[in-house]
Amino acid sequence: MDILKDLELAFITLIRLGAILRVVYCFISMGADEEQSKTYKKRIKNTIIFYIMAECIWIIKDLVLDYYM
């Protein structure tokens, strides 16, 4: 069971780090290329939506497991 907890922690960490790095990259690219700022804003919005959905999935999983165990 410890291996599953470690994998869960690794996935959550990778998702959080990936989302943060993607947003930072988009902000840097937006500053470098003003013509594509609308595209980068949309990418940032999509990244934030992905992050929120990923966190909600983990929370729902934990709630279901706690309820039935």
Image (cartoon, helix red, strand yellow):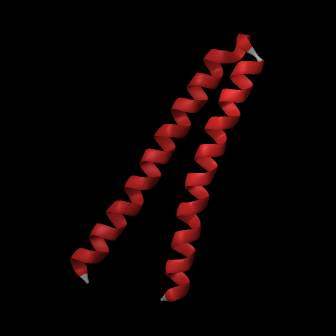
Q: Farthest left residue?
A: 67
Task: Please provide percent x and percent y for residue 1.
Answer: 48, 89
Q: Can you give x and y, in whole percent of width and height, for residue 40 in the image?
A: 64, 24
Residue 23 location (% of width, % of height): 61, 36
Outermost residue toward the right in this view = 32
Residue 33's place in the image compared with 50, above or below, is: above
Percent coordinates x, y for residue 10 in the rendering: 59, 69
**59 with respect to 16 (left or right):** left
Looking at the image, the residue that sits furthest to the bottom is: 1
Residue 57 lies left or right of residue 43; in this view the side is left
For image coordinates 72% across by 10% down, the residue present is 35
Please tell me which residue is depicted at 52% across the width and 81% down the height of the picture: 4
Task: Report the residue at 61% width, 59% height from top.
Answer: 14
- Quarter of the image for residue 69 reads bottom left
Q: Which of 15 and 57 is in front in this view?
A: 15
Q: In this view, does 21 lie to the left or right of 61?
A: right
> Where is residue 20, by image quadrant?
top right
Q: How many marks?
A: 0
Q: Tell me which residue sits at (61%, 53%) in the image.
A: 17
